[in-house]
Image: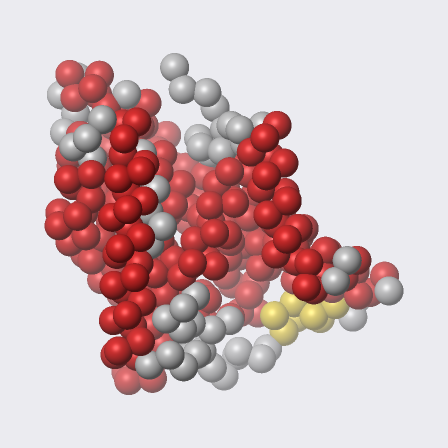
Amino acid sequence: MSQLVAQSIVSGLLLGGVYGLVALGLALSFGVLHVLNVAHGELLMLGGYLAFFAFTNWGLDPFVSLPLVFIVMFGFGVLLYLCLFRFVTRTETHTRIKNSLLVSFGLALVLQALAVRFFTADERTISTAYSSEALTVWSIRIPVVRLAGLVVAVVAALALEWILSRTRFGKALRATSEDWTRAALTGIDVRRVYLIAFAVSAALAATAGSMVSLGYSVSPGIGLGWTLKALIVVVLAGLGSMRGIVVAGVALGLVESLASVWIGGQYREVTALVLFLIVLSFRPLGFFGRARA
């Protein structure tokens, strides 16, 4: 039993890394643009398909194609912002969430339908020579692919933290997040900040999609589930700490994995939702969130 629990803890840690990676993009778009993009999971799905077809058609390893996936989906994010979300951000902050929900929900339906049309509804997964490789520590298996996903999540979070705290653009991004009107008065190009933040959010979702296609599987219908996981992680962590997002993702992965052992696999999703409601009720700013001025 103790070995089963230990294996579940390791599996939860690795799964939580992917949760954190998915949530980074959602936290960025929601924290800066005040836009709740429920099509975030569909962007993940597209990133997974890009990595899959880059592997099957061109023989590109998923880690080699990561920069390509990031760049392509960054461009797609720019297109989405200019065509759709630019108009959402023109409204007052308090009305953006409901408007973005409507716009992104329609976008999610469109992307799902197009994915079924062009990619079929079959599940796709990337199978490399090292897909089944695992490290063994005290009889506990650590899949190399899922461990790499956790590493990618940590690196992405640290890179975002560095950009936000050490670069001029990061400071402009934080100022816009706090109060876009004051940021505009100081000479910050708020629209440019919004554009880049949304595009990076889409690219981060696609990066997570590459890891999902390698360690799990992708299909047109996976978007909503991953969006929900990302939303739970953002609520747990709160806004203001990218490292906190990854920590919250790992915590969610641990809770789900241990719940599968102690309560039963059928209650795994329920446990995550209960945790979501508890944190939202008693600590709405999240464990790492900071109150806005």
Quadrant, the N terminus? bottom right
Name the residue nearer the viewer: 113 or 23: 113
Q: Is residue 153 above or below residue 119?
A: above
Q: Please give left or right for residue 190 compared with residue 235 in the image.
A: left
Q: How is the image coloured?
A: secondary structure
Quadrant, the C terminus? top left
Residue visible at 28% across and 46% down? 102
Name the residue nearer the viewer: 113 or 167: 113
Residue visible at 79% across and 58% down? 262
Q: Can residue 225 be seen from the camera position used here?
A: yes
Residue visible at 35% across and 38% down? 30
- The count of marks equals 0
Name the residue nearer the viewer: 198 or 142: 198
The picture places residue 118, in percent across and down from the top left corner, at 25, 79
Q: Is residue 190 above or below residue 122?
A: above
Q: Is residue 177 above or below residue 247?
A: above
Instruction: Identify the image quadrant of residue 54.
Output: bottom left
Name the residue nearer the viewer: 123 or 141: 123
Q: Is residue 125 above or below residue 269?
A: below
Considering every residue shown, the one lying at the far right of the view is: 1
Q: Please give left or right for residue 82 compared with residue 116 in the image.
A: left
The picture places residue 186, in percent across and down from the top left corner, at 17, 17
The picture places residue 154, in percent across and down from the top left corner, at 49, 49
Q: Can residue 70 be seen from the camera position used here?
A: no
Instruction: Identify the image quadrant of residue 179.
Output: top left
Q: Please give left or right for residue 251 compared with residue 57 in the image.
A: right
Residue visible at 41% across and 37% down? 161
The picture places residue 192, in percent across and down from the top left corner, at 15, 37
